[in-house]
Image (cartoon, rainbow, N blue to C red):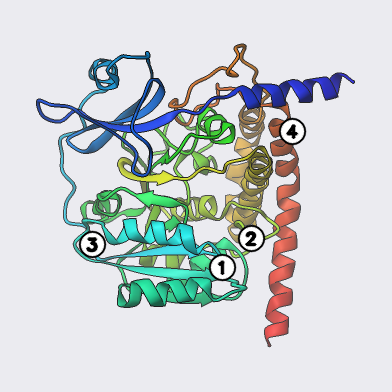
Amino acid sequence: MAGSARAREEIRRFLDIGAVQVAELDLDGAEAVLRPRPGSPPLTHGEVFALVRWGGRPVGTLLGRVPEGADAKAVLVERARAECAPAVAEEPGQPPFTSVVVATRERAGQLARALDSLLAQDHPRFEIVVVDNAPVTGGTRELVERKYAERVRYVCEPVPGLASAHNAGLGAVRGEVVAFTDDDVVADPRWLTELTAPFAADAGLGCSTGLILPARLTTPAQVLLERHGGFAKGFTPRTYDPAHPPGDEPLFPFTAGRFGSGANMAFRTAVLREVGGFDPATGAGTAARGGDDLYGFVRVLAQGHRLRYTPYALVWHHHRETWRDLETQAYGYGAGLTAYLTAVLVNRPSLLPAFLARLPRGLARARALTAVRVTEGADGGGTPGDHDVRTHPWPRRLSRLQRRGMVYGPVGYLKARRALRATARRAR
């Protein structure tokens, strides 16, 4: 009875979460500019989650409540000028020729929105490759051929799984750098330039990641996920160097989730090919449920290459919309975490001693990552915007699913490997 009462209370708190408006506020120049996210209605009173820019570059976010009848711009500008410092002064150098890979499966509407934003990039020289993963209809091919003609290349990968799709894209690209994003994002016009310019400045750089913010916060699920930390990793550029492990990251490099996410990452093409690409037994669409991006980060760092996080490379992500979506996502996060660690150790056994040395702290971090957190208040407590922290509310149901996923992850990885071997035998 107590368990069912807790579950009802969690659902009640979840349903009480209200929508939050999403906006952009640019402080450059004498006159600040406040505008809603493209596709959103004009701003009104209530809660507003605002990305703050200086000179067009993202420098922070804030959550402000605009009283009824008040000027939203005046309310938010005062907060932003007090809380958000200008961007770092240096400008990105000339980015190298880059290939952008977008893996997709039966989501032509979302894909079109993503491709439109990618074709509007200010990068001087790039190509786009769409990988149609295990399609059941011809919708994606028809969209690419009808609407995008010679501007986008189409590749079909019949083996299901995000890592397999990414590997197919990696095999097809021509760029010195290969960037990956998802079909449910909208890329900022300077995303690709900011993400790839660091490769020209640092010959030892193997990977870069960028900032991911919510495109909408209209449903309780979207707001709860962003309160939990979302996908963003803050607004401070940072370079991770395996030759000089960071003192504040005792689990380095195995806490790959701290570095970024697969919706916003780029690799030096030769480096990613050198490490064998992504493990096809990881990632969404396989029994492993996820972890392909984290696997790529660790493999590149383990080869001695640096990884750069830059908040100036921004994509807007369309978070999942329902409680059921969050349940699937929580379980998948847990499974993907331990599946990728299993994959790293299977493919790079020499890392086992370092992994075992970090295991006790890793278990403590896993407990903290999945801990149940309840905050009093009608709205469930917490606010979006504290990026890459885990202090916001996290319901018991989602915590339990995440931990179950972590237990399942190694099993899922091994199942995925067996499935791939069976597919290869049938293909012979």
Residue 47 placement (x, y as % from top left): 42, 21
Q: Which residue is mark 4?
A: 400
Residue 173 visible to an observer of this rendering: no
| Residue drawn where x is 64% and y is 26% of the image | 14
Q: Secondary structure at mark 4?
A: helix
Residue at the farthest front position: 69
Query: Label 3: few (<14), some or many (≥20) within 10 Å?
Result: many
Gap between marks 2 and 4 measured at Cα: 22 Å
Identify residue type, mark 2: Gly
Identify residue type, mark 4: Arg
Q: Which residue is mark 3?
A: 96
Residue 341 placement (x, y as % from top left): 62, 49
- Residue 81: which disc? none
Q: Quadrant of residue 97?
A: bottom left
Identify residue type, mark 1: Ser
Image: 405 above or below 167:
above
Q: Which residue is mark 2?
A: 285
Q: In the image, is 380 to the left or to the right of 121?
A: right
Gap between marks 1 and 3 measured at Cα: 25 Å
| Residue drawn where x is 56% and y is 68% of the image | 164
Of discs 2 and 1, which sits in the foreground?
2
Residue at the farthest left position: 30
Gap between marks 4 and 1 measured at Cα: 29 Å
Is mark 2 in CB contact (under 8 Å) with mark 1? yes
Is mark 3 in CB contact (under 8 Å) with mark 4? no
Gap between marks 2 and 1 measured at Cα: 9 Å
Q: Which residue is mark 1?
A: 164
Residue in front for this viewpoint, 403 or 225: 225
| Residue drawn where x is 27% and y is 18% of the image | 71
